[in-house]
Amino acid sequence: MATTDLASTCFTCAPLERYVALTTDFASELSNALGTPMLILFTSLIGVWAVINGAKLALKQCEIHDLGRDLIYIIVTGAILGSQQNGLISWVYSTALTVMAGSSEAAFAVAGGSLDSSGYSGLVALAANGEAAFAKIIQASSAIARAGALYNLSNYIYAFLLILPYFLLVVMYSSQVVVAIFRAMMVAIFAPFLFMAFAFGWGRQMSYAGVKTLLASVLVLFACTSALALTIYGVKQIPIDPSSLTGDALNNFVSASNPDFLVILFLGWMGSALMTEGTSIANSIAQTALTNTAAGMLTAGTAATAGGMMAAGKKLGSFTNPLTAGRRFTEAARSTAEEIGGWKAMGQTAKSLVDKFKNINKPDGGPS
């Protein structure tokens, strides 16, 4: 039976590529739909601005140079909205993704990786390199688990302890990439309104907030990539050869007294912790309020799904195993019978309560 090459297979790349394609198409269609309405709204606001400021000028409540300054903002904004009428959202979105991927690539380069080697590009390449970097950890865990037996359960425990932090780390980083794509898309969707608001004094602060949010999104992904790159860099300093983990070499490696094994565990959990800290640092720099709620929900959901699939696989295996199938079916039938008996008992109790309340106001308390 063919085996999967963990070093060259990316499990999250196909969903991410599809997600990027969907968001790109959505941004393009939304850009075409909002182009003309935003120009109409912008023209209407210019008319309102002209009437209000004309009245203020006539009443000498403002100076001519104030109107000239605002007029410059209006002309620049009108030129941008007019020239990018049907492509502003797509342009902002694609530019944001390019900046995110380019800035995060430097962190991978320091860790000794190259995005070009994965065969993917952009943010998808970040996820691909994140998975490929820990292929040896996964292979080492598989080698340890294969050495386990009924009389040697400790190897199963060590394999689980080794794979768990890196599984969560890869899932968490992929979740951060998905959230970064969504943040870039949302800022791009609001881009026409933010450009339009920039022309007027009342909306200029909203435009600044939009730029700061986009900058914070870039910083969050860069911080998460740096945390992942730091973990990759540390793991690469520890020589691990999964093919040599047999016999005494395996026993020496999977030991609580082995500093290399403990360092690998520490680096895995440290990467996940530092990713959450990266959001706080980005918020402090850009003065925004981004959170890890979405990435946390994605990570928890993926982990719960994986655990559920493993549990379902074990139960299905027990039913298909001829040595245990009879006992499992008997237990399932007994459980079902007990549940049905419990429902019947609850039904009888409910019926007696109904009869009691029906007859509670009768003199003899009995049925009529």
Image: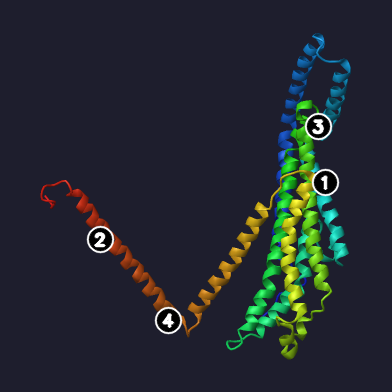
Q: Amino acid at mark 3?
A: Leu
Q: Position of residue 186 (x, y in %)?
A: 71, 43
**Gap in angstroms between the C-alphas marked 3 and 1:** 17 Å
Judge the density around disc 3: few (<14), some (14-19), many (≥20) Cα neighbours within 10 Å: many
Label 1 or label 2, whichever lies nearer to me, is 2
Q: Which residue is mark 4?
A: 327
Outermost residue toward the top?
A: 58
Disc on res. 95: 1
Q: Residue at x 42, y 81 (%)?
A: 327
Question: How many marks on residues?
Answer: 4
Towards the viewer: 117 or 199: 199
Label 2 or label 4, whichever lies nearer to me, is 2
Q: Amino acid at mark 2?
A: Gln
Q: Residue at x 34, y 70 (%)?
A: 338
Mark closer to the chain start, 3 or 1: 3
Instruction: Tell me, yes or no, if residue 322 can be seen here.
Output: yes
Judge the density around disc 1: few (<14), some (14-19), many (≥20) Cα neighbours within 10 Å: some
Mark closer to the chain start, 3 or 2: 3
Towards the viewer: 317 or 72: 72
Q: Which residue is mark 2?
A: 348
Label pair 1/4, CB-CB below 8 angstroms: no
**Gap in angstroms between the C-alphas marked 1 and 4:** 61 Å
**Gap in angstroms between the C-alphas marked 1 and 2:** 68 Å
Mark closer to the chain start, 2 or 4: 4
Judge the density around disc 4: few (<14), some (14-19), many (≥20) Cα neighbours within 10 Å: few
Instruction: Tell me, yes or no, if residue 2 can be seen here.
Output: no
Q: Which residue is mark 3?
A: 81
